[in-house]
Image (cartoon, rainbow, N blue to C red):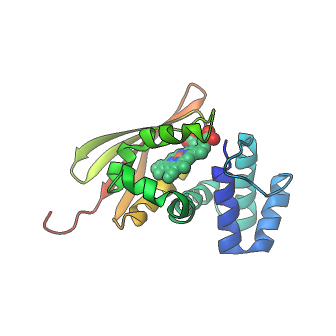
Amino acid sequence: MYGMIHKAIRDMVKTVHGEEAWRAVLTESGAADGDFLSLRAYDDDIAYNLVGACSTILGASPAACLEDFGRFWILVTASQHYGDMMRSYGQDSFGLLNQMNEMHERISSTFSGYKPPHFTVEMRDKSTCSLHYRSVRQGLSPFVIGLVLGLGEFYGEAISIDLESTNSEGGGEYSVFKVTKTLPAGT
Ligand code: HEM
């Protein structure tokens, strides 16, 4: 996987917990070095090992760590580098989620041969949708939760997300989330 998750993990651990905690995570994970580049593809195992190491060193579950990384990635990394692109693809969280496949597709020339997830948004009513997430990988559904919560904060919306089901599918994962937006009074 491209350095997206690796960098989110490193940047968050360093920012929130400090350099020393990051060194401990890196040693625990067995990764050779921590100079991850966004535009380089790394073995998926490195990301999974980093998540496991964070869980051990920081004393939080792997799912809680992944959720934090997702939120951090949107609010720090994506906001800094891709804020304009996100706003041009969506005026709000639901709008962007609806355009996620197109947006991942658009950047496929930069990240050649990458395997982004696939999202489908199904509106239940004007404030609630079912978000269908399909990935060739397993175990990243908590990362999606953090990303979506981050999107809510990015757009200044009150968003909640619940995992409704998750299943293995062709070596990867298919999860359905219920995403709810609290509409301003009177709408
Ligand atoms: C804003 C700019 C964004 C960029 C540049 C971007 C780019 C990428 C890249 C390079 C990967 C690694 C894929 C690989 O190496 O095979 C990735 C993975 C991923 N992206 Fe995005 N992404 C963006 C926004 C988002 C948003 C807003 C969401 C969801 C709400 C999202 C969901 C994911 C997930 C869940 C993965 C993990 C891989 C998987 O599930 O299999 N991304 N993205």
Residue under the point 50% across and 63% down = 79
Q: Quadrant of residue 35?
A: bottom right
Decide which of 24, 80 is in the foreground and name it: 80
Residue under the point 60% across and 55% down = 66
Residue 132: percent from left, percent from top: 41, 39
Residue 127: percent from left, percent from top: 24, 54
Decide which of 143, 76 is in the foreground and name it: 76
Q: Quadrant of residue 103?
A: top left
Q: In which quarter of the image is the C terminus?
A: bottom left
Is residue 41 positioned above or below 74 on the image? above
Is residue 4 positioned above or below 117 on the image? below
Residue 21: percent from left, percent from top: 77, 70
Q: Does residue 140 appear in this view?
A: no
Is residue 163 positioned above or below 91 on the image? above
Q: Which residue lies furthest to the top in this view?
A: 170
- Report the label total: 0
